[in-house]
Amino acid sequence: MAAYFTRRLMLALITLLLVTLIVFTLLRVIVPLVYADAADIIAAEYGRQDPALREQLKRQYGLSSSLPGQYLEFVGGLLRGDFGKSLFNGRSVTGEIKDRLPVSIELGFVGLIAGLLMSVPMGVIAAVRQDRWPDYVLRTLAILLNAMPGFWLAILIITLGSVWFNWAPPLDFAYLHDDPITHLKIMAMPALLIGLTPSAGLVRLMRTQMLEVMRQDYIRTAQAKGLTGRSVIVRHALRNALIPIVTVVGLSLPSLAAGTAIFESIFGLPGMGRYLVSAVGNLDYPVIMGTNVIFATLIVFSNLLVDLSYTFIDPRIRF
């Protein structure tokens, strides 16, 4: 496992380096050619398009040097843990990320756990009760959840809640260490809605995997030995059926990270996704590149942890 982990760690570092190169090229080469430069957007706020003002702004924000020099300066800052300063408010990007990253991680992690806690039992019950009314009800519910986008359901809940029950999400965000009760009230709804997005497909996948595993010879052997139905399902069938689920969960991490941006905007949460959305509108280069590097790092190492978790689910797996 040590050799496997070392190889994967080296590949992760190469992947992150490629991410920085791709994001930098898109922002500093492609976007200025087809849309505008950050200096143009800042100059437009002064109400005039003055070439002298544009050049002054580029020198002020470090955009006048060569592109390779700007890239090397950005990578050097990453190695020092310095993502630079925002072009529009002058705040440290590193400081903003430290405040916003825990919110996004908590939102995505709680949403993922909520989705698994909903989908795995539902899929097991649907498989055990195959072709009976629980199976039909749970499969129908999974199809309905799959047909409803999570952000649409969030908007619907906020709209109907305010009209029918005079309810709306709290506007003032409270951190967990400041006010735990208020924090849980704010985070519970978006986290649950995020969990609905992957859970719909996981229910059907879990049911399919359980049905396949339940037909294996070792399951029939365990039943012939007199083991109870619950013991056969939990100790033998479930662990083997979870391996594809863990794989799908790892592949769904990018969409889960992107989904937090939508829910953070809807519920007004000070997370990384909302920070990135506001930066894209202003072409705030340091913020966009810094947040993309953080998202890429989380996704790459989360997938590595998913791969390593296979040995804990099934001890027969070796790297």
Image (tube, rainbow, N blue to C red):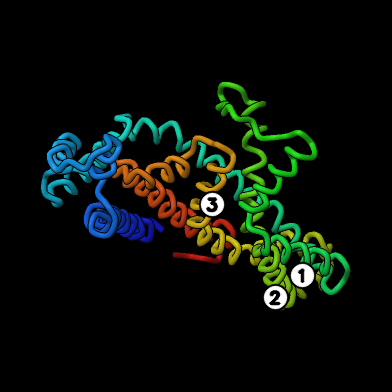
Quadrant for the N terminus in the image: bottom left
Mark sitting on residue 212: 2
Residue 50 is situated, as x and y percent measured from the top left of the image, at: 17, 41
The residue wearing badge 3 is 259
User: Is 312 in front, or is 124?
Assistant: 124
Examine the rendering and report whether any part of residue 148 can be seen: yes
Residue 253 is situated, as x and y percent measured from the top left of the image, at: 51, 55
User: Is 183 in front, or is 113?
Assistant: 183
Choose the circle earlier in sequence order: 2 or 1. Answer: 2
The residue wearing badge 1 is 222
Residue 317 is situated, as x and y percent measured from the top left of the image, at: 52, 66
- Inspect the image, locate mark 2, and give the three-letter code of the amino acid beneath it: Glu
Choose the circle earlier in sequence order: 3 or 2. Answer: 2
- At 71% from the left and 74% from the top, the residue drawn is 218
From this view, report whether residue 212 is shown above or below residue 256.
Answer: below
What is the spatial separation of the Cα atoms under label 3 and label 2, in whole angstroms?
A: 31 Å
Q: Residues within 10 Å of mark 1 (few under 14, many from 20)?
A: some
- Inspect the image, locate mark 3, and give the three-letter code of the amino acid beneath it: Gly
Which residue in the rendered view is the most extreme toward the right? 133
What is the spatial separation of the Cα atoms under label 2 and label 1, in whole angstroms?
A: 16 Å
From this view, report whether residue 77 is shown above or below residue 234.
Answer: above
- At 78% from the left and 66% from the top, the residue drawn is 140
Quarter of the rendering containing residue 143: bottom right
Q: Residues within 10 Å of mark 3 (few under 14, many from 20)?
A: some
SS label for mark 3? helix
- At 45% from the left and 35% from the top, the residue drawn is 100
User: Is there a contact, CB below 8 Å, between mark 3 and mark 1?
Assistant: no
